[in-house]
Amino acid sequence: MRRALYSLIEALFRVLFTYDCLGEEKLPEHGPAVVAANHPSYLDPVLLSLQVQRPIRFMAWEALFRVPLLGSFIRAFGAFPVDIRKGKGREAYERARALVEQGEIVGIFPEGRRSETGWMEPALREGAARLAWETGAPLYPASIAGAYRAWPHFRLLPQPARIRVRYHDPIDPAPWRGQSEDVALPALLTELRRRVERSLMPGVKADLRMSLLYRRPSPWLRAHEYLPPLLLALLAFWKTRSLMDVLPAYGYLGYLLLDHYLLPQGRLVKWLRNSSPVLFLLAWGPHALALAGWPPTWAPEALAAVTLGALFPYLYERGYTALTFIKGLTASFLLAVAALRSFPTPAGLHVAVALYCAAFAWDRHTVFWRWSVPILLAYAAYVGFGLGQGVNVVPVAVAALLGWAVARLLPHREPGPQPDQPLDGLTLRLR
């Protein structure tokens, strides 16, 4: 039952958070162990447990066990209650020590609470070090990177983020067991912090860098944003001579100017701006082509669903990778429009978009590429050839590959902040 529940949650986490765990095989198959990790989010006990075959027994606030469903859930993950009232901590420690002496794995967060910054707090509690020092059980440090971005202490609900858990080589407490606790416990905590932060700090710097980037001023209109609406508006107006028909294109350009000059910047505003060229092309592109006399596009709703599905993994990718993907996709769209003029087919945009997305995902090995590439290729083949469009889809397929070449040879580049910008004692190299 426990493994079935873990497998279900792990599958969900891999989709929502692109979760991965490294080094879990270092934990012993039998016998006692103490796991100590940084504590950036609400998710940490689950993140540490998902790929570990044995249950890790975590301390949890005893009030949580009285919450319907939640109490049963955390018990399934091996948690045991702790009374956090003053003077009651010794009872929880004795319970943890008894579990270690019985050969269990006990998990403790030395910070004692969720981090307020994303990295380890300056003061660590000695419980994990004392437990290893008194029992002789190996102390396994673990780093959790990305979880602070996914679900920090100040946010009610989680959001997508790349999360990686890494178990490090164990610390053998034997060299310190002959020393006094005043010497041994600080030494064990120092070694624990060193191992955790060695792999944690790059992720912390990445989180801080993302926070800086989301607060940056909005960029001026970029070529892959303003060229598609202008060209499509020109094609439609040339045929209809109606300003009302091309009003959506100029409305989109107005939105870009509004974002640049007036909108306060943040994560969602940046996401909307960066994905807006694709959203605009999906919403108005097929209609503009129909106005210009191009063949009607089959099932624009299906085209939108496939494109948005291919766009979803880039919520987890680095910003320049996502922007490069969008830049190449707009190039593929415009090149496909040019090909459709001479080789009309209602399946053209479907083939071009699916083939470009597959080529880019395969080239960059983006998130979920092993699943998305065959699905996208199968979709392009079915719509292009399975529905009888024949050789007319070849030019748009070439257009898709040329769009991929544009993304490959001309990746997105954007001037950033100063190369070295100190923040809270960390120097972020942003280029």
Image (tube, rainbow, N blue to C red):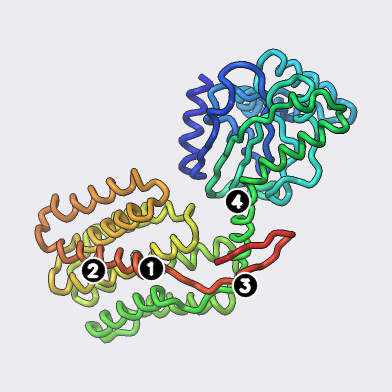
Expressed as whole percent of the image width and height from the top left, the position of residue 118 reads 68, 49
Mark 2 vs 4: CB contact within 8 A: no
| Mark linked to residue 336 | 2
Q: Is residue 325 visible?
A: yes
Identify which amino acid the numbered label 4 is placed on: Gly
Expressed as whole percent of the image width and height from the top left, the position of residue 345 reads 15, 64
Give the CA distance from mark 4 to mark 1. 27 Å
The secondary structure type at the circle numbered 2 is helix
| Mark linked to residue 327 | 1
Name the residue nearer the viewer: 113 or 132.
132
Identify which amino acid the numbered label 2 is placed on: Ala
| Mark linked to residue 50 | none
Q: Nearer the viewer, mark 3 or mark 2?
A: 3
The secondary structure type at the circle numbered 1 is helix
Please tell me which of labels 3 and 4 falls first in the chain.
4
Give the CA distance from mark 1 to mark 3. 25 Å
Please tell me which of labels 1 and 2 falls first in the chain.
1
Identify which amino acid the numbered label 1 is placed on: Lys
Expressed as whole percent of the image width and height from the top left, the position of residue 310 reads 36, 54
Give the CA distance from mark 3 to mark 2. 39 Å
Instruction: Give above or below for 426 relative to 39.
Output: below
What residue is drawn where x is 29% and y is 67%? Answer: 403
